[in-house]
Amino acid sequence: KGLSEHYGLSVGNIFTGAGGDEIIELIAKLFFNKEEEVVISRHSFIRYEMAAKLMGSKAIVVAMKEGFKHDLTGMAKACTEKTKAVFVTNPNNPTGTYSTKEELCKFLKDIPLNKAGLKPIVVLDEAYFEYAFLEEDYPNGLDFLKENSNLIIFRTFSKIYGLAGLRVAYGFASEEIVDYIERTRPPFNVNRLAQIGGTAAIEDNEQVVKSLELVNEGKEYLYKEFRDLEIEYIKSAGNFILFNSSPYKGKELFDALVREGVIIRAMDEYELPDWVRVTIGLCEENELFIDKLKKIFSRIRISNKE
């Protein structure tokens, strides 16, 4: 009810899950079958491909465009009569890039019909929506829901609201799709505490504003430090930044920073062995990260001079 009032949508267009992972799994169990295909982007959230394989579906992986952006045109062209679903992360995890309103609109129109004479399901993962929605050309998936009955959108309380431990996410879809999901999901998947926490959080605009300010300030600080250190990075619409770990491999830099008391994320499982992802933290945490990064990189420079 709280989500319905907040977004101005019918309860029949809304469903919940115990985190985004469960929603992905619910969609897979409900719609995916053997001999069918699921289109995903390379370097996007790894759970999509895992969910497809779990149900025996074939994952069709489409390469990204330059700048680590989804190639939505390529993803639409990759759809065949066997395609059951397409996953689009916006903004994308782990690259932080996003697809624009124009790109998403064209993509939804260009997707061909499958063997059932229907457009494949488009799953729009907006887990980091709140960090990106102020970008001028960033699309709000809800604007496309009414005209696209094949669209499923989901968001989470785990990111900007800081409720990852409660495991609560929510989604939007046509009443027909929501009805199918409600028949499939476990009856007690979102516990009472998570419901109370989510209901309170959705109206806590002060938390969202503070988090956005903190992330945006930290982002600009890290961008500047990366430029000063001549480190390649990708501008992000999320609360994290993907940057090149050269001259180290990503796992090597991860290990070196762990020894200094700082944890980042190596990207080997995303097929990005020369990149790492850092989450933007408090001011003092960002400064500590940069201090330790400079210390580690100075070893290379000293070694090269010798």
Image (spheres, grey):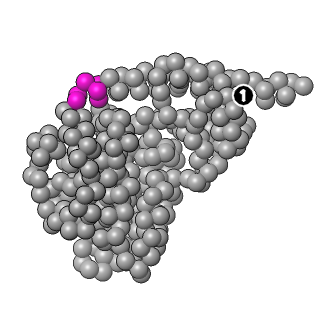
Could you tell me which residue is drawn at 65 percent across and 34 percent down?
258
Disc 1 crowd rating (10 Å Cα; few below 14, some 14-19, many 20+) is some
User: Which percent across, then down, holds residue 183?
Assistant: 20, 68
Q: Quadrant of the C terminus?
A: top right
Q: Nearer the viewer, residue 249 or 114?
A: 249
Tell me which segment is drawn in magenta. Answer: 204-209
Picture quarter containing residue 76?
A: bottom left
Q: Nearer the viewer, residue 175 or 245?
A: 175
User: Which percent across, then down, holds residue 260?
Assistant: 67, 28
User: Which percent across, then down, holds residue 242?
Assistant: 54, 38
Total numbered circles: 1
Q: Is residue 165 shown to the viewer in this render? A: yes
Q: Quick check: 194 above or below 187?
A: above
Q: Quick check: 296 above or below 254?
A: above
Specify whether residue 233 is painted magenta.
Answer: no
Could you tell me which residue is drawn at 59 percent across and 21 percent down?
288
Residue at image mark 1: 296
Could you tell me which residue is drawn at 25 percent across and 68 percent down?
184
Q: Is residue 104 shown to the viewer in this render? A: no
**Amino acid carrying mark 1 in the image:** Ile
Q: Is residue 301 left or right of residue 22?
A: right
Q: Is residue 39 left or right of residue 300?
A: left
User: Which percent across, then down, holds residue 96?
Assistant: 45, 41
Q: Quick check: 147 above or below 143?
A: below
Q: Is residue 267 left or right of residue 84?
A: right
Q: Main secondary structure of the magenta part?
A: helix
- Report helix, strand or loop for mark 1: helix
